Image (cartoon, helix red, strand yellow):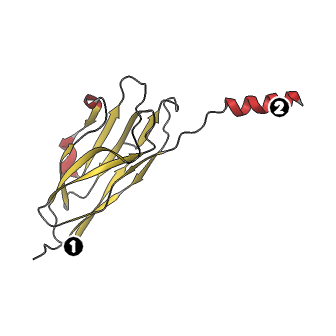
Amino acid sequence: MKLLLFIAVFFYCGRSQAQDEVTLALQDTTVVPGTHFCEEFRASDFREITNFQFTLRWDPMVIRLDSLSEINLPFIDFFNTNMALAPGGFIPIIWIDPTGAGVTMPDDMSLFKACYTAVGTPISSTPVEIASTPLSAEIVSVASAGEDIGLVAQNGTVNIVLPYN
């Protein structure tokens, strides 16, 4: 009996608990043509994260990406993208904790903002997506030892409406 108890305790304690997937959420936005606006990328379950990457996608005939701003991640020099690709409706986004110690952020914290201009006609819309092409969506934590723990994307939509008179 003691042997069975020992084995049960050993296997229970020896198992690593899987970390929750990290959620990155965007909101739906309604604007009129010509409006400059920003969308926050809010994270939940961002615990001991060492790096993440994904592709940000949208329809460039509806909105134009102007900038990324208010980056609230440490090691801002290790937050990278290629804005030259923005006219094509996508950019890769990569962030790395160079120390490898992992970063924890409070739930619903804005990691950064993407700022756009509405260039489409009224009654047009576009999804704003955290996508996996061409750069795959991955997020890694200290506990995952280099393995992807999963990024849950809550994508948003930008709707362009008629101006109010």
Question: Mark 1 belongs to which amino acid?
Answer: Ile
- Residue with the mark numbered 2: 5
Q: Where is residue 49 in the image (x, y as percent from the top left)?
A: 43, 34
Q: Measured along the vertical axis of the image, is residue 4 above or below residue 36? A: above
**Measuring 78% from the left and 33% from the top, which residue is drawn there?**
8
Front-most of residues 134 and 96: 96
- Which quadrant holds residue 5? top right
Q: Where is residue 131 in the image (x, y as percent from the top left)?
A: 37, 50
Crowdedness near tag 2: few (<14), some (14–19) or many (≥20) residues, C-alpha within 10 Å:
few
**Measuring 29% from the left and 29% from the top, which residue is drawn there?**
75
Gap in angstroms between the C-alphas marked 2 and 1: 66 Å
- Residue with the mark numbered 1: 123
- Which quadrant holds residue 14? top right
Q: Where is residue 22 in the image (x, y as percent from the top left)?
A: 45, 44
Label 1 residue SS: loop
Count of number-bearing discs: 2
**Measuring 35% from the left and 48% from the top, which residue is drawn there?**
42
Quadrant where the N terminus sits is top right
Closer to the eye: label 2 or 1 = 2
Quadrant where the C terminus sits is bottom left
- Which quadrant holds residue 112? top left
**Residue lying furthest front:** 106
Q: Measured along the vertical axis of the image, is residue 46 above or below residue 121? A: above
Q: Position of residue 124 (x, y in %)?
A: 22, 69
**Residue lying furthest top:** 99
Q: Is residue 26 left or right of residue 32?
A: right
Q: In this view, does 46 lie to the left or right of 110?
A: right
Q: Is residue 133 left or right of residue 68?
A: right
